[in-house]
Amino acid sequence: MTSETCPHAAAICAHAEARTFTSATYNDSLVANLNRLRCDGTLCDVTLVAEKRKFPAHRAVLASCSDYFRAMFTSGMRETCAEEIELHAVPALGLSHVLEYMYTASITLSPDNIEQVLEAASQLQVSVIDYCCEYFIEKIDKSNCFEVLEIAQFYSMEEVEMKAGKFILEKMTYSEEFPLLAPETLAKAVTNDDLDMTEMQVFNKVIHWLNMTPNGTEKVKDILQHVRFPMIPETDLFKRVLTSECMEAIPGLSDLLQDAFAYHSKPILQPSMQTEHTRPRQAVETVIALGGRVKVEGPLERCNDVLGLDPSTGTWHTIADMPWPQSTHTITSVAVMENFLYVVGGQNQYGSVGRRSTNAAFRYDPRFDEWLRLATMKEDRACFCLLALGGLLYAIAGQNKNGNLRTVERYSPLTDEWDYVARMPLERSHHAGTVSNGRLYVSGGMHDNDVQGTMYDFEPSENFWQFKLPMKNERFGHGMASVGGKIFSVGGCTCNDQGDIIDVTSMECFDPETNQWNTMATMPQGQSYAALCVQGDSIYVVGGCNRNEKTVTCHTNRYDVTKNSWHKMADFPHHSMGLAGSTLTVTRRMLNKPTY
C-alpha cells in the first residue's frame, strides 16, 4: 500500500510562512508523568539509599537537577552504572523532600524538616537551598534568631546570616546569648547597611557587648572600625563617645575618631570627604521635588517643602523644609552632587520674571537633615539650569532684573567660591540642561522673546560652547534628562502663529553619537515648568502648567525609556509649577514621615 500526500495541503504550505507552536501544558504534563513513573517504580534506572531507606529514581532527572549527580553519572565513576548508590551523611527525610522537588518543582518546608532538607540540598547541590534561605528569613524571631544565625554560618548562607545578625543587634542586645557572640559575628552585623538604628545606637550596643564579654577588649577595635563615626552628631562624639571608658582605656581606639572630627570640622569640604563610613544606613533612592507651590487660582504661596516619592508605596512624603529666604522662592534650580542637594537662585514671584531673583545658594545634607548656606553667585539668576559635573556646579544663563543672561558661573565645593567660565553664544532663559558623557548640554529657552530650539554642549577642559543639531520642536519651560547615553527633551511650551502659549507634548531623544533627534512617545498631557527627575531607566515629570487647559497641575507621569511608554503615578500633593526636581538618597526613616 503506497502512502499519498494531499495535494491541497502541499499547495497551501508552499505559500505559507513558518510558524512555531508551543504547548502551554506540555511542561507540567511532562513533570507530572515523570513523577508518576518514579512513584510507580517504572523505568527507574537507579536506587538511592539514605539511612537504609531506598528511593527509586531516573538518572536523567537527577543529573538535570543536581550538579552533584551530573558529575557522578558523567565522570566514569563506579556509580555511573551502579544500580544502587548509598548517600552517606544525607538524611532520608531531607532526600525524600529534595527528590519530590526534583520531580514536581514544589517543596513544603516546616520546622520539622527544614534542617534535614537543607543538609540534603547542600550535599546534592540542588537549588532548594534558596527556598531554605527564604524560609529561615521569614521565620526569624526572638526564640530562634541565635540558632538561625548558627545554621546560616554553618551552611554559608550569607543573606540569612546578615538578616539574623541584624535582628540580634536590633532586638536581642540584652539577652543572655548576646555576650556569647563571636567578635567576627558582631563585626559582620555592624557592617550591615540595613540596620534600623542610629550610629550612636550601634556604638552603644558594641560597648554593651564589650562590657559583658570576657576578653572582649582584644577584638573590640576590629568591631568598632565598622561603626560609622562621621554619622554620629558632633555633640554626641564629644559628650558620649570620646568620654566612653573604653575609648580612653584601650590604646588606638581614639584614632578611629580622628576622621569623624575632621569631617564635622569642615562642613564645606564634606562632599569631597565621602567614604563608606559616611554612607547612611537603610538608604533609599527617591525622586524629589521642591518649590513652586501655587494655589489652583494662581497666587504664589510659601513653598518650603522638599518632598520625596517613596518607591515602595508610591506615596509622597515631606523629607525636609527649605530655609528662609529660599522657602519663598520658585523657578529655583537644583543639582545633586555626592548625595548633597544644592538649591540655587530663583525668584519669589511669578510676575515680572527675573525682577525679584536671587543669587542665594544652599546645600542640604540628608544624612543629618541639615541645611548649609553657601557663597552667593556673582549674579542674581532665575529661570536657569544648574548642572553638576566633575565635582563642580555650573549655573548657566537665566534671567534677572537686567534681562536675559549668557554668563555661566562655576562653583567649587572645595573653596566655596563661584567663578565665571565661557559664556553661552546667546543670552537665554527658561532653557533646560543635562549632563551626558562628561559634557554639559543646554537646549531651548527664550532669547529676545523668541522661543529657541537650538542646543549647545560644553566640555569643561575646552571651555567652549559648541552648536549641536537643533531640536525638532522649539520649546521653553521644558526639561532635559540623560539616560543610557541618550538625551531626552521633555514637555515645555511654545508660541503659535497667533502668539498664544501652547503645550509641547512631543518628546525628543538625541543621540550624541549620531547627532540626530528622534521623536518618542507623546506625553499624556502638557507639562511645562515641571520637575524632571531620573531614576534608573525612568524619567519622572512632576507638576507644572498645562497651557492648553490653563491650569496648574499636580500630575506625576513616568516615562519608561526601555519601553518608550508613559505611566501615571501618584499625584503630587500640591498644584505646582516652577518646580525643581532630582534624585536623592535618603534614609528609610525620612520616608516614614507623614504622607500626603
Image (tube, rainbow, N blue to C red):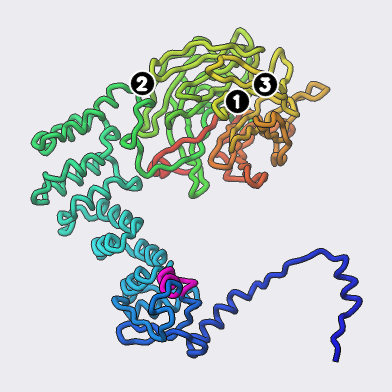
Q: Residue at x 87, y 75 (%)?
A: 9
Could you give the CA–CA distance between mark 3 and mark 2, rounded to whole angstroms?
Answer: 33 Å
Q: Position of residue 407 (x, y in %)?
A: 58, 11
Q: Residue at x 21, y 41 (%)?
A: 224
Q: For mark 3, does the 10 Å Cα neighbourhood hold few (<14), some (14 to 19), or many (20 or more) residues?
A: many
Q: For mark 2, does the 10 Å Cα neighbourhood hold few (<14), some (14 to 19), or many (20 or more) residues?
A: some
Q: Is residue 344 above or below residue 148?
A: above
Q: Which amino acid type corresponds to the residue marked 2 in the rendered image?
A: Ile
**Residue reaching furthest front?**
76
Q: Which is nearer the N-term, disc 3 or disc 2?
A: 2
- Callout 3: helix, strand or loop? loop
Could you give the CA–CA distance between mark 1 and mark 3, rounded to whole angstroms?
Answer: 10 Å
Could you give the CA–CA distance between mark 1 and mark 2, rounded to whole angstroms?
Answer: 26 Å
Residue that badge 2 annotates: 268
Q: Is residue 224 left or right of residue 354?
A: left
**Res. 126 image quadrant:** bottom left
Point out the stretch of residues depicted in magenta.
63-73
Q: Which is nearer the N-term, disc 1 or disc 3?
A: 1
**Residue reaching furthest bottom?**
1
Q: Residue at x 32, y 54 (%)?
A: 162
Residue that badge 1 annotates: 433
| Tag shown at residue 445 | 3
69 part of magenta stretch: yes
> Taken as a whole, is the magenta stretch helix, strand or loop?
helix
Q: Position of residue 405 (x, y in %)?
A: 61, 12
- Callout 1: helix, strand or loop? strand
Q: For mark 1, does the 10 Å Cα neighbourhood hold few (<14), some (14 to 19), or many (20 or more) residues?
A: many
Q: Is residue 184 left or right of residue 552?
A: left
